[in-house]
């Protein structure tokens, strides 16, 4: 399907809410309100698989970026208002994720399966909408097929912030919280012990317990 920056799934019936962009989650902003990573106007960038990000075409203030996105809102066409044949093509393009990973690396399997659990159950993640779960699905797919190395999701002080790391920390944190509460309610001590071990391993993989990790709330 041809990429169109005026097509959206999320938001509401009148606006895609592109300007709901979040500092430190969708984009990194410095203390002056600039984003040195992004290169006037907007451009679409492939952001893993079938996911596209709408970004500034040059360095600009965060407030200017949001104003451009607000203008784009008025030109957007909602996904479910497409003609039926185009809609069917778009639906067929959605990722189908297996619940269990076949990857040969144990740590990758654990992270993939945590991602998939969040996508399949729509585990509540603060501030997330449909686009965020769709992006996580792309990360999971890329992780499973090797296009995205696990190291790209692990906090590293030298590498710094990345959107992938921010989403991984949010998703895995939410998964641990939700599953931990669920097994606690079950009263099954064996299941609780297994979950505690799995969650400790997940936190260790992504360095979620590191005090210097700014991605951990």
Image (cartoon, helix red, strand yellow):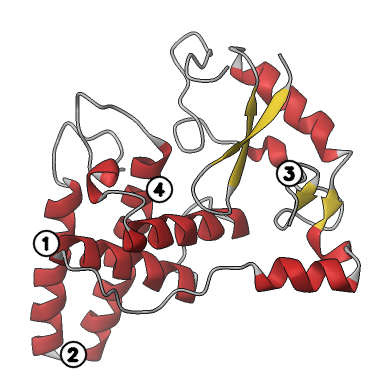
Looking at the picture, does residue 180 appear above or below residue 127?
below
Q: In the image, residue 45 lies at what x, y percent?
A: 60, 36
Q: Which residue in the structure is indicated by mark 1?
A: 201
Callouts 2 and 4 close, C-beta under 8 Å? no
Q: Residue at x 9, y 70 (%)?
A: 197
Q: Is residue 94 left or right of residue 168?
A: right
Callouts 2 and 3 close, C-beta under 8 Å? no
Q: Residue at x 20, y 49 (%)?
A: 206
Indicate which label's residue lies in the foreground, 2 or 4: 4
Callouts 1 and 4 close, C-beta under 8 Å? no
Mark 4 and mark 3 lie on one chain; the one further toward the N terminus is 3
Q: In the image, residue 10 lies at what x, y percent?
A: 70, 56
**Is residue 125 in sight in this rendering?**
no
**Is residue 21 in sight in this rendering?**
yes
The image quarter in which residue 98 lies? bottom left
Quadrant holding the N terminus:
bottom right
Q: Which residue in the structure is indicated by mark 2?
A: 187
Quadrant holding the C terminus:
top left
């Amino acid at each position: 399907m041809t990429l169109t920056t005026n097509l959206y799934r999320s938001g509401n019936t009148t606006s895609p809410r592109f300007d709901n962009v979040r500092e430190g989650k969708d984009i990194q902003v410095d203390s002056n309100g600039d984003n040195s990573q992004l290169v006037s106007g907007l451009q679409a960038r492939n952001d893993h698989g079938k996911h596209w990000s709408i970004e500034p075409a040059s360095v600009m203030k965060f407030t200017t970026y949001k104003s451009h996105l607000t203008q784009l809102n008025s030109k957007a066409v909602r996904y479910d208002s497409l003609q039926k044949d185009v809609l069917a093509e778009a639906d067929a393009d959605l990722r189908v994720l297996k619940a269990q990973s076949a990857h040969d690396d144990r740590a990758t399997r654990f992270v993939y399966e945590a991602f998939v659990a969040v996508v399949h159950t729509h585990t509540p993640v603060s501030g997330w909408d449909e686009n965020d779960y769709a992006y996580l699905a792309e990360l999971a797919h890329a992780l499973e097929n090797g296009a995205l190395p696990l190291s790209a999701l692990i906090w590293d002080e030298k590498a710094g912030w990345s959107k992938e790391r921010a989403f991984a920390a949010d998703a895995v944190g939410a998964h641990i919280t939700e599953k931990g509460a669920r097994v606690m309610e079950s009263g099954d001590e064996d299941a609780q012990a297994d979950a505690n071990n799995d969650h400790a391993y997940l936190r260790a993989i992504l360095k979620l317990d590191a005090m210097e990790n700014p991605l951990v709330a």
